[in-house]
Image (cartoon, helix red, strand yellow):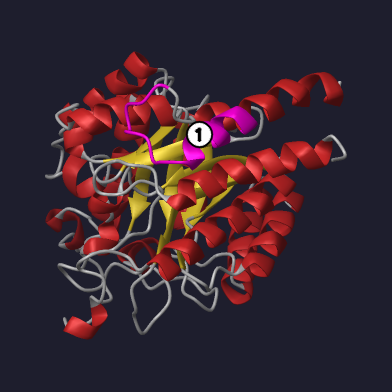
């Protein structure tokens, strides 16, 4: 069975790499490798989409996204501040367009996110009564998850509920509802959208202390008899410092809980900053030294970025029986949130496609990882 399966895969990937190694092809080029095709037997390949891309107003993205990806996550339009701006008022316009986009291009949609302490509508933070806040919480999940039941593949039910040491973040949800709010969110989501996969999503939850807290949180949900299907490791890492050992240990430990494992917001930052993590509330003062690559990325950094991505995908392929999805947080470098965080106006290069939607060396190293894996399986 393995020999029949891998011979065409190896040949196809070898031809694709050979065809593209001499020069970078235009994003619309029909002979450019397709990530979703190369990894079709391994895991889904996703991207985050902004409003312009969902509405297909960005012509280059309109070509590249369906070519490369079979999963998509909305960057912002399903977050509470957009979809639920006032008490009892919902705005489903862009979220509905996302559903239609997925149908049109045969792309599965991951809803992001039902419960998150950030990007909440102002009215939610101003609710004083515990009972009223619980009503908001319940109505939000029932309404949003219920509307898209059967229309989306999965939900990030709760996002970033933990501190770096694994304790519960002191969010408005914790303050108003106690530490059972996570379990209650999954209970409500499971009832409102019974055929949708339900995930917990966080950053740095591959790090030992936060991982332990994440495991304890998941076990609490499971012990309550409430369905949770998977855990998302966001994957916001830094060039030359990707924690491969911690990532592998996390894949093993989360999978041991009976959960699907996915990498939900993958990017590799190349610019300096003085802290780890992805807390959107953290900022740094602007300084020219923090934006060193305005005129382009040095080849040495470009090659290190490619090496890091190849090493990551080597690891993902090693554990492809446990990993169901790898989603990049953005289509190209120009779209990345890392251009504006934690320092506004920087020029960052964290993804596989550059600002002109051209594949970077990292793209080809990711393809090469699959070729090497297939060759290994054949005993080469």
Q: Residue at image x 13%, y 57%?
A: 122
Closest to the observer, 133 or 14? 14
Q: Is residue 29 magenta?
A: yes
Which class describes the residues within 10 Å of circle 1: few (<14), some (14-19), or many (20+)?
many
| Image coordinates for residue 341, horizontal then vertical, percent | 25, 67
Looking at the image, the residue that sits furthest to the top is 104
Q: Picture coordinates of residue 11 (x, y %)? A: 68, 26
Circle 1 SS class: helix
**Is residue 360 left or right of 224 when viewed as pictured?**
left
Q: Quadrant of the N terminus?
A: top right
In reply to whether residue 339 is colored magenta, the answer given is no
Residue 253, picture quadrant: bottom right
On the rendered structure, is 110 left or right of 90?
right
> Can residue 343 be seen at all in this image of the molecule?
yes
Residue 135, image x, y percentages: 28, 46
- The residues colored magenta run 14-30
Q: Name the residue under label 1.
A: 35
Up the image or down, 189 lies above or below 2; here it is below
User: Which one is nearer the viewer's eye here, 104 or 139?
Assistant: 104
* Residue 269 x, y percent position in the rendering: 39, 66
């Amino acid at each position: 069975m393995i020999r029949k399966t891998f011979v065409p895969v190896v040949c196809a990937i070898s031809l694709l790499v050979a065809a593209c190694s001499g020069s970078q092809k235009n994003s619309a080029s029909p002979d450019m490798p397709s990530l979703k095709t190369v990894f079709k037997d391994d895991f889904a390949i996703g991207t985050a989409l902004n409003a312009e891309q969902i509405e297909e107003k960005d012509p280059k993205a309109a070509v590249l996204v369906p070519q490369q990806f079979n999963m998509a996550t909305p960057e912002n339009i399903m977050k509470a501040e957009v979809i639920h701006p006032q008490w009892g008022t919902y705005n489903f316009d862009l979220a509905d367009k996302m559903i239609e986009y997925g149908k049109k291009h045969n792309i599965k949609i991951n809803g992001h996110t039902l419960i998150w302490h950030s990007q909440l509508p102002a009215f939610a933070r101003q609710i004083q009564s515990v009972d009223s806040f619980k009503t908001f919480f319940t109505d939000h999940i029932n309404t949003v998850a219920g509307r898209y039941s059967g229309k989306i593949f999965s939900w990030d039910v709760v996002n970033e509920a933990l501190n770096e040491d694994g304790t519960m973040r002191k969010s408005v949800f914790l303050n108003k509802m106690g530490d059972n709010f996570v379990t209650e969110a999954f209970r409500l989501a499971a009832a409102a959208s019974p055929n949708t996969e339900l995930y917990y999503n966080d950053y740095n939850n591959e790090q030992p202390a936060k991982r332990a807290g994440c495991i304890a949180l998941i076990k609490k949900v499971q012990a309550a008899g409430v369905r949770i299907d998977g855990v998302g490791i966001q994957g916001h890492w830094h060039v030359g410092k990707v924690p491969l050992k911690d990532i592998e240990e996390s894949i093993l430990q989360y999978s041991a809980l009976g959960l699907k494992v996915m990498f939900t917001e993958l990017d590799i930052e190349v610019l300096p900053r003085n802290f780890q993590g992805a807390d959107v509330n953290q900022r740094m003062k602007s300084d020219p030294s923090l934006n060193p690559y305005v005129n382009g990325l040095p080849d040495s950094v470009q090659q290190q970025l490619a090496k890091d991505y190849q090493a990551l995908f080597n690891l993902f392929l090693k554990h492809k029986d446990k990993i169901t999805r790898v989603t990049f947080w953005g289509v190209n470098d120009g779209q990345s949130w890392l251009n504006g965080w934690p320092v506004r106006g920087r020029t960052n290069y964290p993804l596989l496609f550059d600002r002109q939607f051209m594949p970077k060396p990292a793209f080809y190293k990711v393809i090469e990882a699959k070729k090497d894996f297939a060759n290994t399986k054949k005993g080469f």
